[in-house]
Image (tube, rainbow, N blue to C red):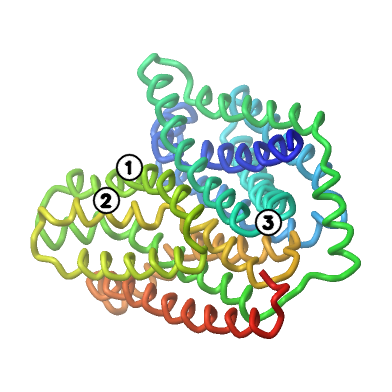
Amino acid sequence: MNNKITLTAISFLANFIMAGFATQFGMLIEPIAEKFAANVNEVASIFSLLNGGALAGTIAAFFFIEKMGIKRMTLISYSLVALSALALHLTSSLQVVMVAMTLIGFCGGIGLCIAGTIVVSVWQEKLQSTMLVVQDATFNIAGVIFPLITTYALTSSLSWSYSYLAVGLVAFVTVIITLFTHFSICEQSSTTQEKQQSEWNLGIISGGIGLFLGMLALYTFLTWAPLFVKQKFDIPFEDAGNIITQYWSAALIGALISTVIVTRVKIHHFLVGIIALAMVITAAIVSTNNLNWIAYLTYGYGFVCAALYNAFIAYGVSFVKKASSKNVSYILISGSAGAMFSPAISSFFERIIGLQTVMYVIPLLYAAIFMLLIVSSRMKSAMEQHSPSVS
């Protein structure tokens, strides 16, 4: 049991580290630009390198985790993350920052796949779903802790890089823990899966499609909601930007409460419920003419979508007898693609159909996911009747 706990802790740290780099970048754009005498837009583009690296990492994980082994991949990935964080602290070149952030994204993407693979190998049934949802809670907790460290560093006239150095220290600790942890449960599972080949069916494929559409809807909202509120209610952009803070504040609480809910409710019912609520809430956000309601609705939206990411992993892998690293990587690739391409896709349609219409598409995307979940849930029931051994 102690080894299971240590493995699970490593999976949580993987999410904690990725959140540490991703959630505070917006706070560091201006300090980085000042440090390197660079254009703000040029620095902002570095965030795309982090996201692009993460997508490339999840794709790489799809092919290499089973071949190289989970422990070796974990050691390599987080050693590189720790060294990259150190490079960010020591460098005087913006090009080095770009390379380091790309490498961090790449290794972080691999790490997220490793985290999911560990959980689906170590835990089964309802505990598996619970642990996957806890990973989302860990991500959101890091999204609060590391920005606080950044705020302290910047207000204390410390270098911007100290905030990322703190994340690098967590990566180094993860390497140490990994060195002294036995991965026999995961490695045996990986060897068996490689011999038997990964199982694929319409259920797990629907999990990837659902997460792609979910991230497309969510990041369209996060990209355009401030401007939408500003234009619709004619308020300063700074005030409209509070909608993002409201979302993430509620997401932390929602992720913690979702962890408790999933221990008592089947993942299918949980996911159908939060998608239905997201559909209703986003429809209300884009159609209301009462500015006072926007904050309450956004808090609700953040609350219900807090555990969306790993809930879809739990949902997708529930359709196979023994989930493999490729199954997990596929769903993560789908989610990463939805998040990464959402700004480009939504920007393209915003120029054609306008911002108001783009915002109306968000609840329609959730409606499509809802229908997909209903169809795949019925398919799962048919599978269970045909073969009771499928969990």
Question: The disc labelled 3 sits on which kind of residue?
Answer: Gln
Which secondary structure lies at badge 3? Answer: loop
Q: Secondary structure at mark 1?
A: helix
- Callout 1 amino acid: Ser
Q: Are marks 1 and 2 in contact (CB under 8 Å)?
A: yes
In which quadrant of the rendered view does residue 285 lie?
bottom left
Residue that appears at 36% across and 57% down: 304
Indicate which disc residue 33 carries.
none
- For residue 124, the mark is 3
Whether residue 279 is situated above or below residue 241 in the rendered picture = below
Q: Alpha-carbon distance for marks 1 and 2?
A: 8 Å
Which residue does the numbered mark 2 point to in the structure image? 299
Q: Please tell me which of labels 3 and 2 falls first in the chain.
A: 3
Quadrant including the N terminus? top right
Q: Residue at x 31, y 78 (%)?
A: 352
Is there any visible trace of residue 110 in the rendered image?
no
SS at circle 2: helix
Residue 328 x, y percent position in the rendering: 67, 61
Q: Nearer the viewer, mark 3 or mark 2?
A: 3
- Give the labeled residue for mark 1: 249
Left or right of 112, for residue 198: right
- Report the Cα–Cα distance between label 3 and label 1: 31 Å
- Using the numbered discs, state the Cα–Cα distance from disc 3 to disc 2 in whole angstroms: 32 Å
Q: Nearer the viewer, residue 45 or 111?
A: 111
